[in-house]
Amino acid sequence: MRKLLLCILIIFLIFSQLSKLFGQIPQYFLTARNLHLVAPDSLWFDIYLLNINYHIPFDYAHGQYFMSFNPNFGNGGTLSFRLLETEPGDCLTPGNLNVSSGTLRFSSTTFPGPGNGCIISHSGLGSLLGRFSLRTSNIFMPIDSFKLKWQNPQSILSTKIFAYIGTTNVEITNPANHFIDLLTNIEHQKIEHAEDFELFQNYPNPFNPVTIIAFTIPRVAQTNSLCYVQLSVYDVTGKEVTRIVDEYNNVGYYEVEWDGSEFGSGIYFYKLEIENGGNKFSDTKRMMLLK
């Protein structure tokens, strides 16, 4: 009986420690943003890591990052991928940069150790992991064909992020919080001949209080028929809080503005639904309002 009670006590202590440990896991947003096509053969973009748990420090331990893109984007040229700048301090400086077969890769170069000052910011856009350059020996295809995406756990090579929880190095990867927000600086390149229905990540994101949501309507089978479009915003309970678009629209690229000044801080979801005859499209994305 004593052995049984001792085992129960040990199990209880283990679970209480685990609960304490995982109750302190920081939450984050990982975002690629600010795309600049600086020349026909060269583009830049930034990657930020933002701590969204203000009361829990994000003590960064390590990260490995994989992103996929359209392998034809380089137009048959030889590609090169390099770091242009990062925030001061070795703990965030990425290394091991590589580009191959439509995949970009980089990772941390050091394990700083717990409490050594590599704390991810919870203000603004967050901490800058790096500004990166991608070049081709030819000229790039049209910028909307870049199709940059994070490679997440369903991929063989996937993005992983680690933090120090106390003195323990813990993986905290959350693919739902990995975003591509490259539209901000290519706004002027309107997609006049969209090939697919597409809902873009809102920008800026996080935002306060106004953000832009963009989507495209391609030329579908019934070319003379308008598409019925609904764009709605939902809270985390799934309740529709507002409907931004509820109308018929033609082929093209659209931007709509949502003003969240009447709503509280938090995570919201926006859902696009388009119908044209037998053609139906639906997509949902996440955004965060910070006040």
Image: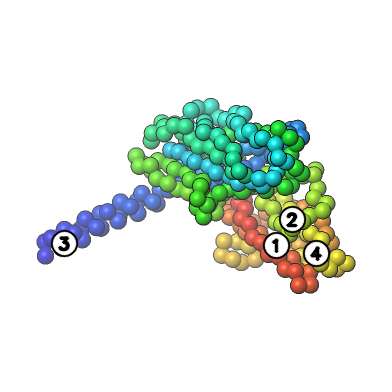
- Residue name at image x 75 percent, y 69 percent: 279
Residue 181, x across and y down, in percent: 66, 46
Q: Residues within 10 Å of mark 3 (few under 14, many from 20)?
A: few
- Residue name at image x 76 percent, y 44 percent: 142
Disc 4 residue type (three-letter):
Val
Labels 3 and 1: the sequence-earlier one: 3
Disc 3 to disc 4, C-alpha distance: 69 Å
Please tell me whether mark 4 sits on a helix, a strand or a loop. loop
| Residues at discs 1 and 2 in contact (Cβ within 8 Å) | yes
Front: mark 3 or 1: 1
Residue 215 badge? 2
Mark 4 = which residue? 220
| Residues at discs 3 and 1 in contact (Cβ within 8 Å) | no
Give the left or right position of residue 14, taking residue 221 as reference. Answer: left
Disc 3 to disc 2, C-alpha distance: 61 Å
Front: mark 1 or 4: 4
Please tell me whether mark 1 sits on a helix, a strand or a loop. strand
Labels 3 and 2: the sequence-earlier one: 3
Disc 4 to disc 2, C-alpha distance: 15 Å
Residue 272 badge? 1
Mark 3 = which residue? 5
Disc 1 to disc 2, C-alpha distance: 8 Å
Labels 4 and 2: the sequence-earlier one: 2
